[in-house]
């Protein structure tokens, strides 16, 4: 015969087990809540003959393909134009910034310390920034940013862990430690000038093969970075850069874990350049996998920018096939990616969308 005390304890245990089972069956409020995301594109000249935002009709054409407005528009410029001697300096792109804002998107400006129109970057070394040679130009640029006065993302000297840009350490005469020093130097000039409307984005390249320099050594520190970032491409088998076909996770997962787990665990992340090569069906499948993976596994990613350009004989654009266009359009419309409703955005640094 079972004693009343044992029966009571057994009943309590059964009740507790049932309650825990119910909790497992019913998701906690907020745990399954989808994240809202910024999204956009770096649109080349293939749609209208001119890149956005110099030609905003390119944005309209792209929007027509995906049937949703963009919340981010990426564009870029180096420090200098050296097609002629002496080099001239690129000014802060006030008109282009305003065109993006008037459309309702947030400008995502990729600015680098290199030069166009030349293959000689010897006058654009990191040591030149650190010595103050570019202080007057940087201060003028920052003053113009302050005068424009609206929030924008500033991705400075990206993919620094590779060896293909003249601002990476180990190339162009750049020495160890100079990258972080240059980043902090430029950031400090912006701060001293009052250009606090810039949201600073630190963006290494996703190291799928662990062949690049360790990302951690280029991190300027939490005081100098507002968002982290990764670039990464599915190159596949091609003559330009033959690599194995890689899924979204193959390309980004290891680097994502290093950034959010060890380098900058409390910073939101954005993918500033991503795209896939391949034919229509394969590329469409890659795009569908990208949207699924971001939603399920990459909680700290709060922005996505597609590299919508032809580059090195590869068609990265979503419009390279009807299947790719359809897959991207469905992913953007299905998931909680924000449209162009940011024309009155205030406050810096820019926060993830709510």
Image: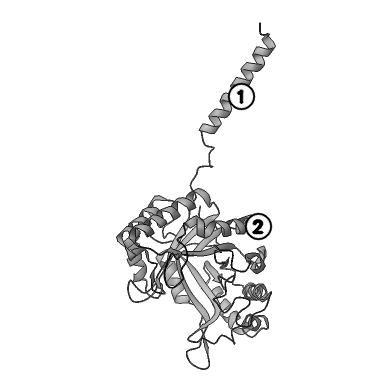
Which numbered disc covers residue 16?
Answer: 1
Q: Main secondary structure of the magenta part?
A: loop
**What is the distance, in whole Å, between disc 1 and disc 2 at their CAs?**
38 Å
Q: Is residue 291 above or below residue 186?
A: above
Label 2 residue SS: helix
Q: Is residue 24 above or below residue 141?
A: above
Task: Return the residue nearer the eye: 46 or 96.
Answer: 46
Task: Return the residue nearer the eye: 55 or 308.
Answer: 308
Question: Which residue is labeled 2 in the image?
Answer: 262
Question: Is 168 inside the magenta-drawn segment?
Answer: yes
Which numbered disc covers residue 70?
Answer: none
Residue 98 horizontal/vertical position (percent): 45, 71
Residue 30 horizontal/vertical position (percent): 53, 42
Q: Is residue 135 above or below residue 340?
A: below
Query: Which residue occupies the extreme left position in the image?
Result: 322
Residue bounds of the magenta highlight: 166-173
Label 1 residue SS: helix
Residue 351 horizontal/vertical position (percent): 55, 58
């Amino acid at each position: 015969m079972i004693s009343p005390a044992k029966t009571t304890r057994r009943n309590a245990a059964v009740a507790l087990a049932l309650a825990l089972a119910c909790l497992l069956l019913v998701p906690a409020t907020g745990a399954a809540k989808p994240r809202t995301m910024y999204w956009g594109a770096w649109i080349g000249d293939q749609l209208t003959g001119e890149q956005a935002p110099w030609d905003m009709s390119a944005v309209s054409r792209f929007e027509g393909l995906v049937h949703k407005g963009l919340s981010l528009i990426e564009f870029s410029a180096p420090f200098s134009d050296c097609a002629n001697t002496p080099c001239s300096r690129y000014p802060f792109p006030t008109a282009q910034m305003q065109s993006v804002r008037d459309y309702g998107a947030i400008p995502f400006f990729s600015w680098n310390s290199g030069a166009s129109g030349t293959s000689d970057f010897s006058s654009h070394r990191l040591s030149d920034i650190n010595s103050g040679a570019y202080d007057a130009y940087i201060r003028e640029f920052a003053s113009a940013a302050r005068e424009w006065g609206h929030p924008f993302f500033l991705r400075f000297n990206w993919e620094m862990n590779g060896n293909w840009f003249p601002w990476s350490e180990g190339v162009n005469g750049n020495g160890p430690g100079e990258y972080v020093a240059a980043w902090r130097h430029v950031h400090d000039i912006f701060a001293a000038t009052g250009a606090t409307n810039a949201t600073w984005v630190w963006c290494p390249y996703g190291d799928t093969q662990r062949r690049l320099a360790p990302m951690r050594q280029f991190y300027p520190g939490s005081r100098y970075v507002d968002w982290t970032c990764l670039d990464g491409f599915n190159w596949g088998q091609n003559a330009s850069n033959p690599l194995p076909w890689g899924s979204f996770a193959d390309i980004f997962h290891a680097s994502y874990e290093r950034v959010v787990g060890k380098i900058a665990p409390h910073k939101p992340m954005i993918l500033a350049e991503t795209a896939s090569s391949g034919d229509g069906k394969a590329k469409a499948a890659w795009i569908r996998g990208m949207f699924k993976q971001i939603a399920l596994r990459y909680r700290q990613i709060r922005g996505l920018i597609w590299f919508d350009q032809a580059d090195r004989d590869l068609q990265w654009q979503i419009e390279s096939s009807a299947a790719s266009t359809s897959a991207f359009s469905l992913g953007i419309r299905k998931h909680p990616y924000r449209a162009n409703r940011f024309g009155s955005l205030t406050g810096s640094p820019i926060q993830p969308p709510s």
